[in-house]
Image (cartoon, helix red, strand yellow):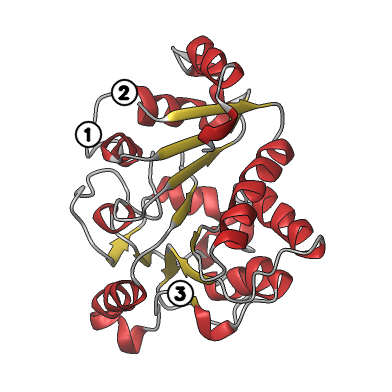
Amino acid sequence: MAEVIVLDTPDDAGRFVAAHIAREVRANPEFTLGVATGSTPLPVYQALHAESEAGTDFTRLTAFALDEYVGLPVEHPESYRSVVDREVTVPLGLDPARVHVPDGSVEGIQTAGARYEAALEANGGVDLQLLGIGRTGHLGFNEPGSSFGSLTRVKTLTERTRIDNARFFDSLDQVPIHCVTQGLGTILRARHLVLLAFGEGKAEALAAAVEGPVSASMPGSAIQLHARVTVVVDRAAASELKFRDYYQWAQDHKPDWQGI
């Protein structure tokens, strides 16, 4: 069973996770962080910026993004290269050469997945992977039906995901149909998974991922196969968890030495 931490607000969750990452980076300056995009991880990035301003040196950290749109120019403000640079690279003072995002260019698309897998392997993998969960249950852009053994590859986005992401664009027509995403098998190789979920809109998918059957129809349930998973949510996202009283009991009696 994953460890589930229920906090009052997304900002509380962001500070909680960022404090853990900052401790890990102080212990190992060459820590590798898997970064997610979208609105969910923003409280973590904002809190990491505060940790940086308070003295934690992130400049030797390496980052790997989960995914990228296919065919969206890297300079587009909603390309994930732009988002990661804006929310992570620049605020934390990272070396851009140590920040990796899949190649979504049409010209390189046939080898994009294999090249990204090679880069991850050469780096020695990811120490902590931040994850959000979509309303379809997707992790990264692994939509329902994705293999638990899948590696980085091109995927077709569901219309539900495109509609959800349209808020970042001027219209739905501008949202790409394809992406390059780390596979579920790739994600499961990270040494620690931290899944974030906020708001009632994520409650159903979260409950299915954490407590439901392990099924390719619910990609988020892949986290149940990992040895070290921390789920950090607000009370709204936790509203459909059957065992939330137990999670709160465990949280209230957590040994100080245990960490997350």
In the rendered image, the vertical position of residue 30 relative to residue 201, given as above or below = below
Q: Which residue is mark 1?
A: 215
Tag 1 or tag 3, which sits nearer the N-term? 3
The answer to whether one can see residue 73 in this image is no
| Residue at the image position 28 percent from the left and 66 percent from the top | 152
Q: Secondary structure at mark 2?
A: loop
Place of residue 113 in the rendered image (x, y in percent of width and height, measured from the top left): 27, 73
In the rendered image, the vertical position of residue 73 relative to residue 11, given as above or below = below
Q: Are marks 2 and 1 in contact (CB under 8 Å)?
A: yes
Q: Which residue is mark 2?
A: 212
Q: Which residue is mark 3?
A: 101
| Residue at the image position 39 percent from the left and 48 percent from the top | 139
Quarter of the image that includes the N terminus: top left
In the rendered image, the vertical position of residue 126 relative to residue 245, given as above or below = below
Q: Residue furthest right?
A: 54
Front-lying residue, 61 or 224: 61
Type of residue at label 2?
Gly
Q: What's the CA distance linking mark 3 and mark 1? A: 28 Å
In-image side of 215 versus 112 (left or right):
left
Q: Are marks 3 and 1 in contact (CB under 8 Å)?
A: no
Tag 2 or tag 3, which sits nearer the N-term? 3
Place of residue 78 in the rendered image (x, y in percent of width and height, measured from the top left): 59, 69
| Residue at the image position 31 percent from the left and 39 percent from the top | 227
Type of residue at label 3?
Val
Q: Residue furthest bottom?
A: 107
Crowding near pointer 3: few (<14 within 10 Å), some, many (20+)?
many
Place of residue 84 in the rendered image (x, y in percent of width and height, measured from the top left): 59, 69
